[in-house]
Amino acid sequence: MKLRMRNTVMLTTAAVLLMSLTAGCTNDGNTPTETAAPANASNGNASGEKAYYDMYDEVTDSSELPDWKGKQLKLKIWYAHGTGDAKRPVPTEDIVSPEIKRVTGIEIDKDGSFDNGGQAIDVKLGMINAANDWPDLAFVTDSGMGSLKDMFAAGKAYDLTEAIEKYAPNLQKRLSFETFPYVKRFSTNNDQDGSIYSFPTQMGDPDRSMKIMDPSFVTPNALEGTDQFVWVRDDLLKKLYPEAKTQDEIESLFVEKGGKFSREDIYDVPVKTTEDFKKLLYDLQNLIKTENITENGKPVEVSYAFGGQDNWGTLAVLANLYGRIPKGSNYFTYFDKETQQIEYMFQQPFFKNIVHDFNQFVRDKVMDPNSLVENNAMHLEKLNNGQYAVAYLYDMPDENVMKAAGKTYRYRKVFLDSPVNTDKFISPMGGVKNNIGVVIFKDSVKEEDLPQVVRFLDYMVSEVGEKMYTWGPKSAGLFDEVDGKRVFKDKDLEDAMVYNKDNGKSLQYNLANTRLASTNVYGSGWPYYPTYMWGGSKVSPFYSYDRVISPSEARNFFDPGNLPNHSYSDLGIPINNDMQIWNFFGVVPEADQFWKGRDAFEKALTKTLAARDDAHFEELWKQFSEIAKKNGGNEELRKKIDDYFKTANKDQLESLK
């Protein structure tokens, strides 16, 4: 596979920012302008024995690879997605990091690595540049790549095109740009200048990814529906709806019925409409008040309006459930089947009505007003103490924490029993994506060390590397192997890695299973390391194990996506370029500029949820709308996004009617 895509392109960048970024490039005044690795780069083995990166075809397990004899590097990583996360889970018996260091000579700096610390990526980037304190690597998602556009143009990060060709055979084999064109668009920041600016890792959507690579593949995973859901405390739900199953009962039924649920099983809570959902929330509030329900002497709230990070959970996930909006649309941009064009959801009356309803919940204390000023750590403390009757997004309370605290109840999924609105909205099913790209900074990583870093990343996406961090190296003794079949010795570890039981065992050993509720977008244990595929590929335990029906899998399969004609693959519309705003970064410059003002946009939107009354809400909504337009959310940008969307999807436009 050829990864060389360089074109000689003249870059035009905002002069002030470009000068600012360039001024931050010290590196003794010798920042290299070319990124090809030096010909005399050390292979780490002066003795003449084979290096690990020449042995992938000769070994089946990481333990068979030799010890690294070359330079030792300690890398500081910036986790640049979202606003940060208060969770810092640390493995107690880490078997992955020592093996990475043994094989590659690379260690991730636990104390020096950091996330956005409550800031938006653009704000954090400005702080890093102002302090001239660059990390070695950044883990960046698709939206983040657009935010780094000017930094790439200023030459702050390595162009990895030639380095990947030379030092990353596993990436070229497993993430072929010809097979996965989205990965190319992501890694080149929408082909900003033809150069690869991030090393692609953690490919998303594993079931469809593997189906593309192997058409005979059949997934053991539940199909994902287009609907959202909420997590509800099953003890409180049972008081309101005696027919509703507890999570224990759901798991028992899953085993009893051979791993399948009927429609009646899934929709056992008679909540059909938005009004029914509102009634559920207010009924829970009345129940909590009437029975004076507390947790460790602390008040129990129905739910929250803010999770201590940003508005995404409330206004992109809960709002979609509430408004019967299918996945793929959010409060920035969506495709409107009625107007036949990309629209701003934040300008639509229906979205304003949803936000107004949520503001009413805050006024009525159905959504905890304190949540609007609490940080993520405070939010998680309440969440894991059972102080919210209803949670949403990936905000499922940590069952291990709750069990250790002696909680006897659990949280279960509740869906609205009504179809999403496909007359107005589409469920886009775009190309298979990768979630995380790794950017390498010139100020911190010496050019002579670039081959070692790229080879480390290539080891992490190799089959040998993936088996290492999903099974543990053979030397760790976590599994037995008979006739090529691996079986975990520890039943709890098997439950965690094969059946997605969130029992803390994967974290204990620092093994990767991003399907677990307690993991974030990067992985389990801090500091997070790069992986090949979200959820694991066919060499991981989840896919390669001789599976039996397990109660711990019930939570995944308790989903309407498993019902006929209700899965994402049934309702999703295949398109080349999704309509989310971050898919236009790099190709519509005004989209990048708008996104840079997201912090002010989000804060103004959050304020509307705290309005005292209707008049105050209208005042705050007007302020928010003005800030959105001032930051670039105007008709000119909408039209340019719409034009690009229709050009990129010209062959699919008929299916959007």
Image: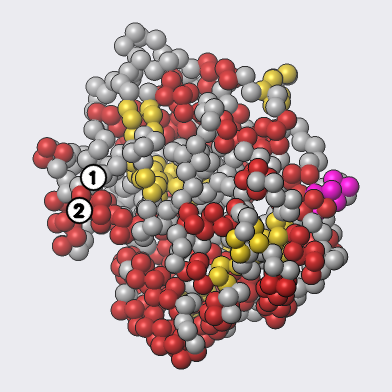
Residue 650 in view of the camera: no
Q: Quadrant of the N terminus?
A: top left
Q: Judge from the rendering whether residue 184 lies leftward or rightward of residue 429; answer left or right.
A: left
- Which residue matches tag 2? 130
Looking at the rendered structure, the kind of residue marked 1 is Asp
State yes or no: residue 370 in magenta.
no
Horizontal relation, residue 598 to residue 419: left or right: left
Residue that appears at 34% across and 78% down = 627
Amino acid type of the residue that numbered disc 2 sits on in the rendered structure: Ala
Residue 253 in magenta stretch? yes
| Residue beneath disc 1 | 133
Nearest the camera: 18 or 2? Answer: 18
Of residues 481 and 413, which is closer to you in this image?
Answer: 413
Q: Is residue 82 left or right of residue 386?
A: left
Q: Quadrant of residue 17?
A: bottom left
Report the residue at 31% width, 74% height from top. Answer: 631
Up the image or down, 512 lies above or below 139; here it is above
Q: Residue furthest left?
A: 29
Q: Which colour style is shown? A: secondary structure
Element on which disc 2 rests: helix
Q: Quadrant location of residue 83? A: bottom left
Q: Quadrant of the C terminus?
A: bottom right
Q: Is residue 358 above or below residue 490?
A: below
- Image coords of residue 198 (percent x, y): 37, 45
Q: Which residues are magenta?
A: 250-256
Q: Tell which of 447 and 119 is nearer to you.
A: 119
Q: Can residue 322 be seen here?
A: yes
Q: Is residue 341 above or below residue 553?
A: below
